[in-house]
């Protein structure tokens, strides 16, 4: 087979591997992430993520400010779900100091954490659709996320980085009429947002064919790479800290732990991870319904009641974890008992471990599917690089 | 299993290599001799009674003021099967610290160990890919060590103005080129 016009034969075409750089500014890498792909034609033979472009020295900063001063820095790690970050930190320091907050503050924290979970999953599911070509669901979900941000802004004045969960309390009590506004949001969520998302994206045949069957992760592999949250539940194990090691009184709420079912292909595929996120929004709404009912009947206490004048834990160390929207967020805090600064703060970020499995799942995929894989792991680079 | 019985099981298997046990802490820990940490990891995962299949966190901590000064690597373990937790620690010298890798037991340790190497300079023997992870490849030093001093220059760029530079700038001299101009922010106060 030859083509004299071009002077080459098909047999002459070299099939060497090619190095392809994706990022650091690729629109679908969810931040400043660079991925080095070794490709053989369309097939990825090896992938190597390069992180650190967004490194802001969180752990170094944390050693140079006092305990409450760390909270604004935690907000900036996972900037899509700030409430979850500061909540995890506040819980860790409270555990270290033995502070028990009142049920009223606990209920407020649950409401904020679950609202944040819905807002975060709106972004996750919406941008996932957008990454692989479905633009409309993104707009619908962002529209509804705005309503949650409005609620946050009304409560604490900030729309993205809240500094809301303090050690021993929260920064502001909920405003008058907050419960009514949350109920209004939940009505709209149940009637419009959720069914729309399912119809437009999750049950879309093109979307299912595009995502079910790629990026399959077995439960053993997921546990070995310490995947947590929706990424782990997508593979099957029903592990949710809110159920397994309840904090903030989560044991008193009724909700289901959603797991990937492998309805349209092998279990643990990209579709399953995204499916878990989508259905989890409904469960969060369920918790919110119960929480606002309780908050209404509850006796109001001062939200600053347990906030210590001076946060100075005794010598000791703690590793505390909580279920953030992206998985288990762990804080390892060492207190030396003399200074008012933490001696050491280490963050185990769920996105960090999710990114570390990337090269395993990407092996043997098509280049186009890499985009679908990154989106399904739902990483936020601010939290990976810290 | 509670912490004392987990410690007892490790002690039965490894004897003197389990150097110390702190039971009174909020989360009890055991100190393991650095040379056996990889074997302890394999045992902790494969033993049916322990079954630590999940490495929650691997962190390094620098203690220059302790006697003797030391570096610690801390392993937080969790078992999905038995729902129990345990903490292992390894004490290392501050200079030239190296410890066997545990990435063969828990795959997630690969990136955690790279992070500890990057920020503390601890070398993990047998690691498959020990490179810097968060900082640039040409970075010099390990910033989370307690004796870290910020450098004045990075690749020829002023990172931090020195007192001498501040003095010269106060005297009206133009320091640096382009975006790295250094002008003290409080100059208008003096004028």
Image: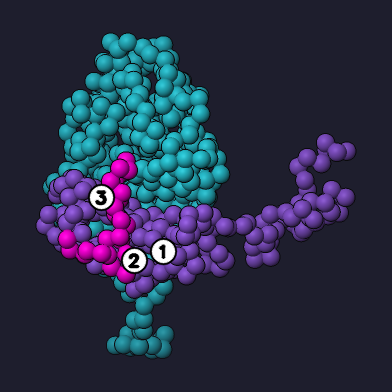
Front one among A307 and A358: A307
Residue B142 seen anywhere in this rendered image of the structure: yes
User: Which badge, 2 or 3, is on the more N-terminal residue?
Assistant: 2
Viewer-side label of 1, 3: 1
Neighbourhood count class around disc 3 (C-alpha, 10 Å): few under 14, some 14–19, many 20 upward: many
Location of residue B42 (image quadrant): bottom left
Range of the magenta residues?
Answer: B12-36
Q: Which residue is mark 1?
A: B92
Cα–Cα gap, marks 1 and 2: 7 Å
Judge whether A145 appears above or below B51 on screen: above
Side of A327 where A336 appears, left or right: right
For chain B, the rendered hue is purple
Q: Per the image, is A297 magenta?
A: no
Same-subunit check for callouts 2 and 3? yes
Residues tagged 1 and 2 counted as in contact (Cβ below 8 A):
yes
Image quadrant holding the N terminus of chain A, namely bottom left
Residue A308 percent coordinates (x, y): 46, 25
Residue B86 is marked as: 3
Residue at left 79%, top 55%?
Answer: B165
Task: Point out the residue furthest to the left here.
Answer: B48
- Secondary structure of the residue carrying tag 2 is helix
């Amino acid at each position: 087979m030859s083509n004299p016009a071009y002077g080459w034969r098909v047999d002459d075409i070299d099939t060497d591997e090619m190095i392809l750089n994706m990022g650091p500014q690729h629109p679908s890498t969810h931040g400043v992430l660079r991925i080095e792909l070794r490709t053989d034609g369309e097939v990825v033979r090896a992938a190597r993520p390069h992180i650190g472009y967004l490194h802001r020295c969180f752990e170094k900063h944390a050693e140079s400010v006092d305990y409450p001063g760390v909270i604004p820095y935690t907000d900036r790690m996972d900037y899509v779900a700030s409430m979850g970050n500061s909540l995890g930190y506040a819980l860790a320091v409270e555990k270290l100091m033995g502070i028990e907050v009142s049920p009223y503050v606990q209920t407020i924290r649950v409401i904020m954490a679950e609202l944040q979970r819905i807002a975060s999953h709106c972004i996750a599911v919406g941008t996932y659709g957008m990454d692989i070509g479905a633009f409309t669901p993104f707009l619908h979900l962002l529209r509804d996320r705005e309503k949650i941000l409005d609620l946050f802004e009304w409560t604490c004045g900030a729309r993205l980085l809240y500094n809301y969960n303090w050690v021993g309390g929260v920064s502001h009590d909920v405003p008058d009429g907050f419960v009514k506004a949350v109920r209004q949001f939940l009505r709209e969520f149940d009637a419009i947002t959720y069914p729309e998302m399912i119809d437009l994206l999750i049950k879309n045949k093109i979307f299912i064919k595009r995502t079910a069957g790629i990026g399959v992760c077995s439960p053993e592999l997921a546990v070995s790479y310490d995947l947590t949250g929706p990424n782990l539940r997508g593979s099957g194990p029903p592990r949710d800290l809110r159920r397994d090691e309840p904090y903030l009184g989560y044991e008193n709420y009724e909700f289901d732990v959603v797991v990937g079912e492998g309805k349209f292909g092998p279990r643990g595929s990209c579709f399953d991870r995204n499916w878990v996120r989508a259905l989890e929004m409904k469960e969060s709404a369920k918790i919110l319904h119960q929480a606002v009912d309780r908050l209404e009947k509850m006796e109001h206490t001062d939200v600053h009641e347990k906030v210590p004048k001076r946060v100075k834990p005794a010598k000791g160390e703690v590793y505390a974890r909580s279920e953030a929207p992206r998985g288990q967020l762990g804080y390892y805090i060492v207190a030396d008992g003399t200074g008012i600064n933490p001696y050491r703060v280490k963050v185990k970020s769920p996105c960090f471990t999710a990114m570390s499995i990337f090269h395993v799942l990407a092996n043997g995929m098509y280049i186009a599917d890499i985009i679908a894989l990154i989106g399904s792991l739902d990483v936020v680079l601010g939290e990976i690089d810290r | 299993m509670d912490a004392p019985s987990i410690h007892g099981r490790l002690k039965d298997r490894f004897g003197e290599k389990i150097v110390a046990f702190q039971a009174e802490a909020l989360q009890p820990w055991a100190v393991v001799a650095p040379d056996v940490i990889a074997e302890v990891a394999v045992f902790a995962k494969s033993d049916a009674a322990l079954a630590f299949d999940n490495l929650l966190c691997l962190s390094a901590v620098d203690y220059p003021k302790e006697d003797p000064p030391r570096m610690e690597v801390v392993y937080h373990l969790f078992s999905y099967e038995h729902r129990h937790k345990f903490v292992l620690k390894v004490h290392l010298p501050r200079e030239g610290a190296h410890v066997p890798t545990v990435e063969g037991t828990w795959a997630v340790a690969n990136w955690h160990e790279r992070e500890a190497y990057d920020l503390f300079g601890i070398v993990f023997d047998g690691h498959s890919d020990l490179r810097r992870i968060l900082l640039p490849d040409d970075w010099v030093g390990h910033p989370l060590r307690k004796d870290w001093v910020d450098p004045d220059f990075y690749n020829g760029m002023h990172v931090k103005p020195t007192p001498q530079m501040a003095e010269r700038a106060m005297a009206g001299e133009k320091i640096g080129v382009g975006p790295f101009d250094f002008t003290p922010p409080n100059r208008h106060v003096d004028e």
